[in-house]
Amino acid sequence: MLKAEKIGFRIAQHRLLEDVGCVVGPGEFVVVLGPNGAGKSTLLRVLSGDLTPTTGAVSLNGRRLRNWSPPVLARQRAVLPQQSALSFPFLVEDVVRMGRSPHRAVARERQETIVQEAMRRADVWHLAGRLYPSLSGGERQRVQLARVLAQIWDPTDLGPRYLLLDEPTSALDIAHQHQLLAIAREMLSGGELGVLAILHDLNLASAYADRILLLKNGRLVAAGPVAEIMNCADLAAVFGIPVQTIAHPQLAGRHLVITGHHVSDARPSS
Ligand code: ADP
Ligand code: MG
């Protein structure tokens, strides 16, 4: 499993994370939710090993992240960052091929099969010959998904692999949001993969996640199974807007509705 214990992260006097714990098990889909600036991306970067926590520790399959060599770690977990700056005119299929760079020992034919399959899964196969900078934001996001899928495609002898996705649906239309999360869920079915994704839509999260973490001001406000979080009394406080969760007459589970307008603290009283 991917496990973070008592994570603190500070830059100068700024506390970006304080006493945050988090576990992603194999076969599990964990979603992190919280307002802008809550520390979600910082947590994901700590979990990926991109940032070293000031306090606490992260381990992957029982071994501290700092004890993994970068190329081996790259075969064990892949990260879809919030922004993927790539303005050089690469072809889409070459961007996806970059995901295979930690796997140099694999035969070229097999590499190509994986690249094609990853593009098919992420619904970007038809874009293979396009220049990446010419794509829309949503198309780029799906190409980046194909790249990270390609990166952790093969099982390793080091146990379960993990996908860390930072707002993977932010530029996607509704159908592609569901498609992306369904792809992530499908990948979990073998039980050899765990996914952690940062999202903004609690209803989307509750449709696909096993567990949800609510983060605010660098602290965990709540963490638990979807049903528990949907009944959490703190939702309005976390999102900063009046909300209720209601039962849908046909669909299972509860659904979040906005029940009022955001009231700015800065608004004049008269
Ligand atoms: P989220 O992804 O939840 O929107 P982030 O993890 O990106 O939030 O950032 C958490 C907070 O830390 C934000 O308020 C952000 O402005 C702040 N922050 C990020 N990087 C730095 C930095 N280098 N120095 C000071 N504050 C930072
Ligand atoms: Mg972020």
Image (tube, grey):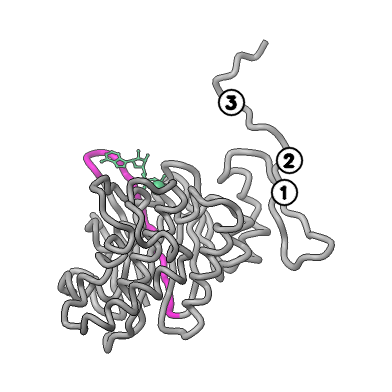
Quadrant position of residue 158 = bottom left
Q: State the separation of the CA atoms marked 1 and 2.
A: 7 Å
Judge whether residue 94 is colored magenta: no
Kindly state the secondary structure of the residue where label 3 is placed.
Answer: loop
Q: Please name the residue shown 53% across and 65% down the image.
A: 181
Quadrant position of residue 157 = bottom left
Residue that badge 1 annotates:
244
Q: Please name the residue shown 40% across and 55% down the image.
A: 166
Question: Mark 3: few, some, or many residues within 10 Å (few <14, many ≥20)?
Answer: few
In this rendering, the count of numbered labels is 3
Residue that badge 3 annotates:
264
Disc 3 marks a residue whose amino acid type is Ser
Disc 1 marks a residue whose amino acid type is Gln
Q: Please name the residue shown 22% across and 40% down the image.
A: 12
**In x, y percent, where is residue 145?**
40, 63
* Depth check, front residue: 66 or 149: 149
Q: Please name the residue shown 40% across and 75% down the image.
A: 117
Q: What stretch is highlighted in magenta?
A: 11-26
Question: Mark 1: few, some, or many residues within 10 Å (few <14, many ≥20)?
Answer: some
First of labels 3, 2 by sequence position: 2
